[in-house]
Image (spheres, helix red, strand yellow):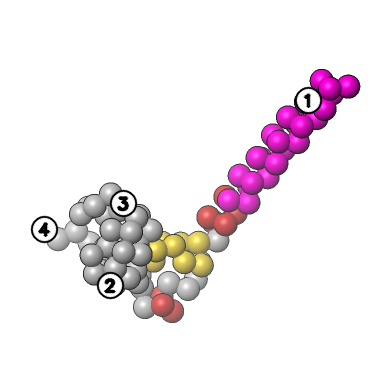
């Protein structure tokens, strides 16, 4: 009986992890990167100047971005594409 409980628990864990992965993927698809709206220290990822989230030095830097709900970036005053690199 003990072995049956272990197998059942393991199977339930695998199923739960699969569902969590699907939910995370669905949430990611419902979001988009929005450039130019991140406040200092509140960006979601790195840029050419740094590699970490939370390292933005100033508010609304054009190359810093945050994830926002799809379709809301321009309403927030941002752009869905990164700025062109300067030459």
Q: Using the numbered discs, state the Cα–Cα distance from disc 2 to disc 3 in whole angstroms.
A: 16 Å
Residue behind mark 4: 87
Callout 3: helix, strand or loop? loop
**In the rendered structure, which disc, 2 or 3, sits on the residue that comes first in sequence?**
3
Q: Using the numbered discs, state the Cα–Cα distance from disc 1 to disc 4 in whole angstroms.
A: 60 Å
Q: Which is more foreground, mark 3 or mark 4?
A: 3
Residue behind mark 2: 59
Q: Using the numbered discs, state the Cα–Cα distance from disc 2 to disc 1 in whole angstroms.
A: 52 Å
Badge 2: how crowded within 10 Å, few (<14), some, or many (20+)? some
Image position, residue 74 (x, y; %): 41, 75
> Which of the image's four quarters has the N terminus?
top right
**In the rendered structure, which disc, 3 or 4, sits on the residue that comes first in sequence?**
3
**In the rendered structure, which disc, 4 or 2, sits on the residue that comes first in sequence?**
2
Callout 2: helix, strand or loop? loop
Residue at image x 54%, y 56%?
Answer: 29
Q: Main secondary structure of the magenta part?
A: helix
Residue behind mark 3: 52
Image position, residue 35 (x, y; %): 34, 66
In the displayed structure, would residue 76 be above or below residue 20? below
Image position, residue 16 (x, y; %): 70, 41
**In the rendered structure, which disc, 1 or 3, sits on the residue that comes first in sequence?**
1
């Amino acid at each position: 009986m003990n072995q049956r409980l272990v197998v059942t628990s393991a199977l339930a864990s695998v199923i739960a992890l699969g569902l969590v992965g699907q939910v995370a993927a669905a949430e990611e698809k419902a979001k988009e990167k929005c450039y130019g709206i991140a406040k200092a220290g509140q960006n979601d990822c790195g840029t050419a100047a740094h590699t970490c989230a939370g390292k933005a030095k100033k508010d609304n830097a054009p190359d810093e971005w945050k994830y926002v709900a799809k379709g809301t970036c321009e309403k927030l005053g941002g752009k869905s594409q990164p700025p062109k690199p300067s030459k």
